[in-house]
Structures are given as structure tokens and as C-alpha cells.
Image (spheres, rainbow, N blue to C red):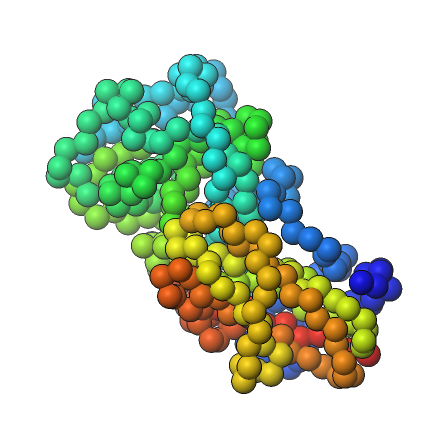
Amino acid sequence: MSDPSRRNILFLSTSAAASALLPGCDRLVLPGEEFLTEIPPISTWETFYRYSYSGRPEIDLDTWSCVIEDRGSEVASFDVAYLDTLTPVAFEHTLQCIGSGPRLQNIDNAVFGGLPLSEVLADLGVTIDSSIVEFAFEGVDGYHDSFPIEDLDKPVWLVWEMNGEPIRAGHGFPCRLLVPGRYGIKNVKWPSAFRLVDEPYIGYWQEQNWEKDGTYKANAFIKSPPNLATVMRNEPLVLLGTAYAGEDPIERVEITFDDGDSWEDCVIDYGPGPNIWTLWRFDWTPTRNGRQRIRTRVTTEAGVVSNPDPSGTNRLNGYDGGMEIEVAVQ
């Protein structure tokens, strides 16, 4: 493969120009964005995306605790001293923001350390009555949401380590929840209260008309080359990307260069199974000058196919498309 530094990236000065070149895709190239030679399976804490609705709160470990309420009555609580008595289990897990899309590819994978939340609750003497329908939560920052009580059996994880170290402040220190199968809106950071509720709960983003369910949709991103890049004719180029559908593992990633008239299989470099992203590649040598559209699609083990619209269908429900880019071949 040729030296990526020899390639020039084409930047557009306005979003209108970008739309003219690439209908259906809203990803804009940012200054300094480069070609990749690989996507590391494990994201570092520095590169793992961070999002919070109101900024990162200051946590005072001397006073922080998380209370547990059952229909409005406090039944237990825990603090950092309690977490220090627990032995974490390490496991790989991918998180994706419900607001992610071709423009903002907020998806990453790490090795977390913690315990199933159901085990922690049992250890604290918390029992769950059959009338409980949802598990609601609130963060120190005031963020709040919920998930069905049945999710505890997946299990839902309470984690306090990330890549073998104490979880960093931007990722939820001193602990956070990881909820398999559901976008980041259901994975609270900096928890201050867990609440067992016996009626449907309306969370912060549902108040803003985002989807309540928050289950992952099958989707694919192209990480490299950047959208609107210039590539060299007759020079080998590797296309790299991610694919994900939460609990439903990705079985196939395909790519088209002719707007879907024909599809070719990509090579899956990494795809361990449920709740872990799939990393794919496609080796391509452009043979003609001009602009070239490239689009992806994914199929899951359950047979779910990403939406043919590369923009997805409804941004408030999570991205469900196969991303499309355009490059200039010269």
C-alpha cells in the first residue's frame, strides 16, 4: 500500500457544498483527519468517546454514595469503600451513543471490570418484588432514565474499572452502568440513585422525544478513508470500518461501488460476538478517475439488514443505516 501521507484530503468550506457532493450522508471531514491503517479492537480511555448532557460533575469521594430506593423508600446504599471490597470481573463491551451517525461516529469498545448489578443488589440485601416494572436511575449530574427490570438478567453490569484501571472521571468514575443491547442513554455514569419503580418511567431524553426503548439498530460506519478524500488511481487502498447491532452479532458486512447494483463481502477482522463491535476491511484499488461513491450494509445473525438509506431512518431512534462516502480518484 502507498504511503497515506502522499494522499491529499479534500475539505469543503460549507455544508451545502458537502451535501451537493454526497447526498444522504452528513459526515464532514475535520481538519487533521487522516487515513487509518487499522482500528484497534480495544479503545483507550483517551480515545473512547465521551458524552454527557450537562458536562462532567465534580465527585467528592468523601461524600459520594448511591442510594437504592424501592417505590420511593430507601432500602440500601453503597459508596467507594463498599466497591473496594468487591472483586471485579473483566469483560469486553461496546458502547454506542444513540445520537451517533456518519457525522459523529460515537462508538468504542473497551475491557471493563465490575459485577452483575443483580449480584450487587443481592449482596446489599435488596429484593425485587414482582410488581416492579422498571429500573430507574439518576446521576450526580441530574441525568435520569430507566430500563426494563428484566434487563437485570442479561446481566446489567455495575463497573468501576476500564482497561485494567479505575474508570476515569469522563467515563463515570467512581462507577457506571453498562446495559447490554441498549444505547448509551441507558448506561448511566456517576450514579447517585437507583430506583425500583412499579410504573413506566419517563427519562430525560424521552422528555425531548428521543426513543424510550433505546435498543441498538444494525449499522455500519466507514472510518477510513475520510469522506471527500482524494485517493490515487491504481494505488491499493484499504477501507476500514465498524459494524454493530448490540446483542445481535454482525454476520456479514458488504460494500457497493455502484449504488447497490452489486455487493462485495468485506473481510471481518474482529467480531467476537454479542455486545462487541465488528471491525471490517476491504482492499480496493481504484481504476478510473473521478468521483466514486462507496456504501456499506450489514446483516446480523438474526437476519436484520441495515437500512438502505445511508442517512438512516430516524435519528431519535438511533442510526440504522450503512454509511456512504464519496472519494475523488485522481
Position of residue 268 in the picture relative to residue 97 (left or right): right
Residue that extends furthest to the right in the rendered view of this protein: 6
Name the quarter where the C terminus is drawn. Answer: bottom right
Q: Position of residue 68 (x, y in %)?
A: 28, 27
Work out whether 263 lies above or below 64.
below
Residue 169 shows in this picture: no
Looking at the image, which residue is at 59% across and 66% down? 266
Q: Quadrant of residue 283?
A: bottom right
Residue 14, quarter of picture: bottom right
Residue 62, horizontal then vertical, whole percent: 47, 16
Residue 225 found in image quarter: bottom right
> How many marks can you see?
0
The residue closer to the viewer here, 62 or 286, is: 286
Left or right: 244 as drawn, with respect to 43: left
Name the residue nearer the viewer: 224 or 83.
Answer: 224
Can residue 299 be seen in this snapshot? yes
Residue at x-position 57% and y-position 27%: 165
**Which residue is depicted at the point 60% across and 46% down?**
41
Report whether 63 appears left or right of 150. Answer: right
Position of residue 99 measured from the top left corner of the image (x, y, whole percent): 48, 57
Query: Which image quadrant: the N terminus?
Result: bottom right
Residue at 29% across / 38% down in the picture?
152
The percent position of residue 259, horizontal first and vertical second, equals: 57, 82
